[in-house]
């Protein structure tokens, strides 16, 4: 199996850098709490990345790594960046700072058994500013808990949104994951217009057929095999445009 190629430390950003990220979590929380994505979708995703020989960043909950250690081990062994997605996929705005600290530190303790973990993304891309010092305390260097598609980015805030000073590098997601499952005519034009670095994210459960589940339409449409074909096509699209695929950790080093 071909190992993904990563840029040297500190390599300058290109005109089109692309970071494919995966939020390794239960199936479509809070609507489902099964694990078909980790059992069926995650191995297929890693096979796809190996076939394309690209590095990715896998934001993994502590529970996912604890329940599926072979997946966490494979992520690290195949040259991808293992990163934290909290411990239990509990939304941070719903918990106090003490519980938030546990979510961060417990996930870090489990994930760091498999490799160096310095990047973080909060569930649902919702992370109160008051929690940022907890990441620094836990040894994280990068936060990707913002999204350019979120209302908080666009309404009443600047680009990037105003936030307290922090030593963390903050790199937002470029768009929501369901965009990758749109018809190619719409999707490709939109993706190629995104500002570099392009940070895309998917979930393993999107690569399991959930079309008959009682979910929001954006969570279930074109899931399963169509989603797999769509991601394959998106990676191929960026390759044809001479994009460089890069991890979040390497993006931070190049910023």
Image (tube, rainbow, N blue to C red):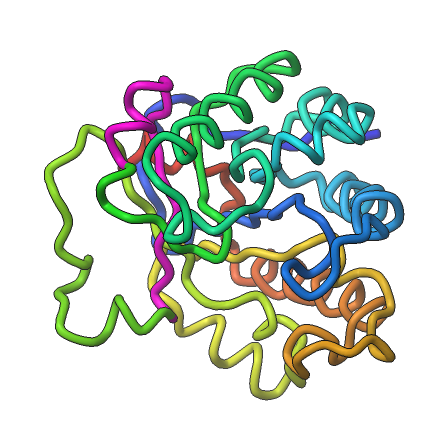
- Image quarter for residue 56? top right
Residue 201 pos. (x, y %): 56, 56
Query: Quick one: quadrant of the N terminus?
Result: top right
Q: Is residue 24 left or right of residue 150?
A: right
Residue 151 pos. (x, y %): 31, 73
For this rendering, which residue is in front, 146 or 94? 94
Residue 70 pos. (x, y %): 82, 25
Q: Residue at x 26, y 67 (%)?
A: 153
Q: Is residue 41 left or right of residue 10?
A: right
Instruction: Tell me, yes or no, whether the highlighted magenta stretch contains residue 144.
Output: yes
Instruction: Tell me, yes or no, whether the highlighted magenta stretch contains residue 146.
Output: yes
Q: Residue at x 14, y 67 (%)?
A: 157
- Image quarter for residue 12? top left
Q: Is residue 65 left or right of residue 87?
A: right
Query: Quick one: quadrant of the C terminus?
Result: top left
For this rendering, which residue is in front, 37 or 214? 214
Residues rendered magenta in the picture: 132-149
Residue 55 pos. (x, y %): 61, 37
Vertical position of residue 210 compared to residue 207: above or below: below
Q: Residue at x 66, y 15 (%)?
A: 114
């Amino acid at each position: 199996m071909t190992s993904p190629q990563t840029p040297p430390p500190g390599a300058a950003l290109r005109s089109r850098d692309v970071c494919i990220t995966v939020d390794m979590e239960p199936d479509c929380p809070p609507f489902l709490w099964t694990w078909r994505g980790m059992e069926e979708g995650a191995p297929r995703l890693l096979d796809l990345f190996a076939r394309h020989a690209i590095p990715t960043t896998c934001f993994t909950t502590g529970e996912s790594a604890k329940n599926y250690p072979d997946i966490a081990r494979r992520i690290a062994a195949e040259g991808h960046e293992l990163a934290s997605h909290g411990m239990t996929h509990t939304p941070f705005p719903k918990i106090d700072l003490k519980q938030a600290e546990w979510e961060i530190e417990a996930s870090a303790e489990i994930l760091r058994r498999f490799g160096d973990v310095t990047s973080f993304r909060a569930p649902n891309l919702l992370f109160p500013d008051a929690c940022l010092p907890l990441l620094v305390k836990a040894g994280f260097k990068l936060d990707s808990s913002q999204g350019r598609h979120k209302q908080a980015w666009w309404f009443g805030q600047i680009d990037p949104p105003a936030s307290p000073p922090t030593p963390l590098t903050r790199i937002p997601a470029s768009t929501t994951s369901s965009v990758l499952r749109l018809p190619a005519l719409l999707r490709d034009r939109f993706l190629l217009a995104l500002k570099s670095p392009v940070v895309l994210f998917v979930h393993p459960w999107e690569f399991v057929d959930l079309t008959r589940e009682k979910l929001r339409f954006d969570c279930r449409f074109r899931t399963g095999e169509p989603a797999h074909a769509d991601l394959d096509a998106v990676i191929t699209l960026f390759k044809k445009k001479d994009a460089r695929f890069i991890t979040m950790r390497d993006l931070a080093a190049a910023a």
